[in-house]
Every structure is written in structure tokens, then in C-alpha cells.
Image (tube, grey):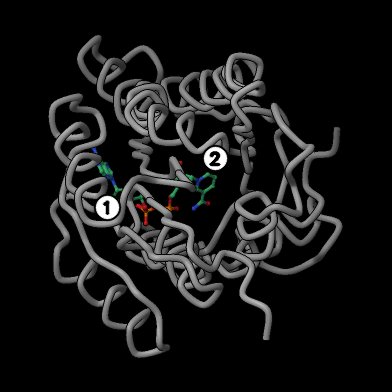
Amino acid sequence: MIMRLRHKVALVTGGATGIGREVCLAFGREGAKVVVNYIGNSEKAEKVVAEIEANGGTAIAICADVSNEEQIGSMIREIGAKWGGVDILVNNAGIYPRKTWHEITGEEWDKVQAVNAKSCFLTSKAVFPYMRSKGYGKIINVASVTFFRGQKDFVHYVASKGAVIGFTRALSREVGGDGITVNAISPGAVRTEQELLDFPDASLQEETRIYLEQEQAIPRRQLPHDMAGCFIFLASSDSDFMTGQTLNVDGGWVMH
Ligand code: NAD
């Protein structure tokens, strides 16, 4: 079997759960050395590491708050010392607190921008020297279908995902000459374990399923592993002439 990410070092932020977890497992299967970044859920992060290792892969978990420049710096230095740098960066960590827009405080707004958007800038900046010295790198930012649709009770979140897409486009022009591609993946409504914890009500789950089946071209709930192939594509040399783009991976919900 050809492993498309063999000898690459991949950092996935927020890799302990949900979409990030699935990306870590997929990258591990493709032969990458995987760094599972996490905050506050070390047991889950270690479980992802153990799962990758059980499949014959290589992984470590590193705790760092991706909205904190110092913590990012020390994480990247640790990876540099251990594995010589980062070839693939997936900016996946995110928070999505639901709130009526006029009740959102300035601090809450800033926090969402810091974790979802500023983190992409800080982490990309921290890995850039390694990628530039190799003349090659892959940056994948995680956006959201909500940016294309607008979404009630999520103005801070939707704005942060717009920033992620804007950052993706602008950064691709800065680093294209260094052999680095920058793209975004925009997931639809993914049924993660967090969703089931946030919305355990079976009738609400059923309502959501029916609604999404009407909205999407592919009439079923999206699961984290539905995106794995697109992440591998953007992380591998198959996508070397593609940059600044946002791939909607949402079962055909929004189209552009
Ligand atoms: P999730 O909550 O399972 O994953 C987010 C991860 O980010 C968690 O492990 C969390 O601990 C981590 N995280 C949060 N703040 C952090 C910080 N400051 N530093 C480091 N890690 C931090 O949810 P998910 O659905 O897997 O979300 C992953 C990404 O996908 C997010 O960017 C989210 O906005 C995006 N997204 C999700 C959906 C969906 O339907 N689930 C849809 C569109 C976009």
C-alpha cells in the first residue's frame, strides 16, 4: 500500500476529539508522524496516540493553547527538536459557543476570534521557518459551512470562520514562492461526539437529520471520517498546484 504522507510530520491542532481526531488517525494511516495538539483533554489525546501506534504509526500528544503565542512557540520548538519541524499543519482547533448576538460580550467575541482565527495566523507563523527552509509545506485551515450560509446565534463564530477563509487566501499569496500551499476545508454539520453531548435529545437529532437530508445533495448525516480523504489530499503532493482555495466538504449543502 502506498502511504501518501510517509516521512512527513503533521501537526493537528485540537486533535483529541471530533474532526481533528479523525484527521490524526487518517494521517497516521498514511505514514505521517502525527502531533496531536490538545488542551484540557489529555486522556483523549493519549487515546488518539495509542490508536495510531496500534495501527503501526507514530504519534505524540502535546498540550498547548493555540490562542497563546508562547505556548505555540514552545510546542513548535518541541516538535522541531524531536522531528526536525512541521511539514503539514492542520489548524483545526475551534470553539463554537451559541449566543444571541446582542448578548455576546466583547471578551467572548475576542476569545472566539483568538481560538478560531488568530490561532491560524500564530501557528502558521511559527511553522513557517521550517517549511521555508525545506521549500515545501502544507497548511490546511478548518472553516465552516456557516460562513457561506450565515447562522443565527453564532455571529462571532461565523465572523471568525470568514477570517479563516480570508487568511487562507491572503497567506497563499505570501508563501506560494516558498513551495507552501494554504487551503481551507469547510465542513458541513458534522455529527461528532460533542454534538451528541450538546444535543442528546433524540427528537432534536431526528429533526436535524431530516432538515439536513433535505438541504444536502447527499441525504445523510455527515460524520468526521467523511472528510478524511480531502484532508489527505490537501496534505499530500497530489494538491501541490492548488492553493488559496476552500473546499466545501458538506455533502453538497452549499455550492460555489
Ligand atoms: P470538537 O469540539 O470536537 O473539536 C475542537 C477541538 O479543539 C477540541 O478538541 C478542543 O479541545 C480543541 N480546542 C479548543 N480550544 C482550543 C485551544 N485554545 N487550544 C487548543 N485546542 C483547542 O469539535 P469539531 O466539530 O471536531 O471541530 C473541529 C473544527 O471543525 C472546528 O474548527 C470547528 O469550528 C469546525 N467545524 C465543525 C463543524 C461540525 O459540525 N462539527 C462544522 C463546521 C466546522
Residue 151 placement: quadrant? top right
Residue 61 placement: quadrant? bottom left
Q: Which mark is residue 137?
A: 2
- Residue placed most toward the observer, 7 or 165: 7
Mark 2, Cα crowd under 10 Å, few <14 / some 14-19 / many 20+, is many
Q: Which of marks 1 and 2 is nearer the N terminus?
A: 1
Residue at position x 37%, y 35% from top?
98
Residue at position x 70%, y 34% from top?
246
The yes-or-no answer for disc 2 within 8 Å of ligand 1 is no
Residue at position x 69%, y 30% from top?
149
Residue type at mark 2: give it. Answer: Gly
Residue with the mark numbered 1: 37
Q: Position of residue 163 (x, y in %)?
A: 52, 18
Q: Where is residue 225 in the image (x, y as percent from the top left)?
A: 58, 70
Q: Are marks 1 and 2 in contact (CB under 8 Å)?
A: no
The yes-or-no answer for disc 1 within 8 Å of ligand 1 is yes
Assign the C terminus to one quadrant of the image.
Answer: top right
